[in-house]
Image: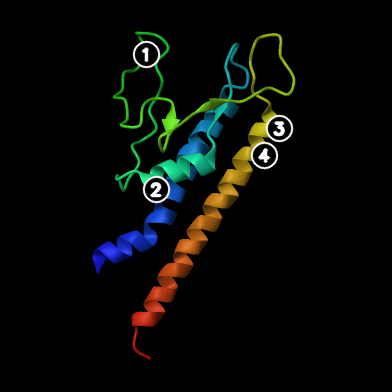
Amino acid sequence: MVSKLDDFFRFNEMALNLRAQRQQVLASNIANADTPNYKARDVNFADALKNALDSKSTTLPPLQLERTAAAHVAGTAPDNGPGSIGGSPLQYRTPAQGSVDGNTVDLDVERNEFVDNGLRYEAGVTAVNGQIKAMLNAIQPG
């Protein structure tokens, strides 16, 4: 019974985990908008979700920091490798307009993606809540 419930919620669990990790990547892009030579990154959500669902793991490893110097905070690499989400690599965003300092963050694009991803996360939570309410209604006497 429990395994059937796990299977029932697995898609939404993975989708919400991926959305949360993507939100971290987008927030990092926004936070580094003024960092010289920073390259904006994102992930193909559909590919990441497909890879996550195809994997045998039921949970995603946490998004890890990427070290650019030996003196930076150390961390362990996740199972799906650094710089990836759900087994899909983070991709560098192609800038619409170049900048003198080499930074590829376009704040308009990043803000739009951030809000869109947040709304989709909220929609996923609403869907899960609806599924739970439907299941509770089905098992309650009345």
Tell me which corner region of the image, top left, top right, bottom left or bottom right, holds residue 9. Answer: bottom left
Callouts 3 and 4 close, C-beta under 8 Å: yes
The furthest residue to the bottom: 142
The residue identified by callout 3 is: 108
Left or right, 35 with respect to 56, comes to right
Label 4, secondary structure: give it. helix
**Cα distance between the residues tagged 3 and 2:** 31 Å
The residue identified by callout 1 is: 72
- Amino acid at dot 2: Leu
- Amino acid at dot 1: His
Determine crowd level at label 3: few under 14, some 14-19, many 20+ residues with C-alpha closer than 10 A. few
Q: Earlier in the sequence, mark 3 or mark 2?
A: 2
The residue identified by callout 4 is: 112
Label 3, secondary structure: give it. helix
Residue occupying image coordinates x 40% and y 43%: 52
Q: Earlier in the sequence, mark 3 or mark 1?
A: 1
Q: Earlier in the sequence, mark 2 or mark 4?
A: 2
Label 2, secondary structure: give it. helix
Q: Which is more toward the observer, 141 or 47?
A: 47
- Amino acid at dot 4: Asn
Tell me which corner region of the image, top left, top right, bottom left or bottom right, holds residue 40. Answer: top right
- Amino acid at dot 3: Asp
Residue 58 percent location from the top left of the image: 31, 48
**Cα distance between the residues tagged 2 and 4:** 27 Å
Label 1, secondary structure: give it. loop
Residue 87 percent location from the top left of the image: 40, 35
Left or right, 127 with respect to 112, comes to left
- Quadrant location, the N terminus: bottom left
Q: Which is more toward the observer, 18 or 24?
A: 18
Please say if 27 is above or below 92.
below
The residue identified by callout 2 is: 53
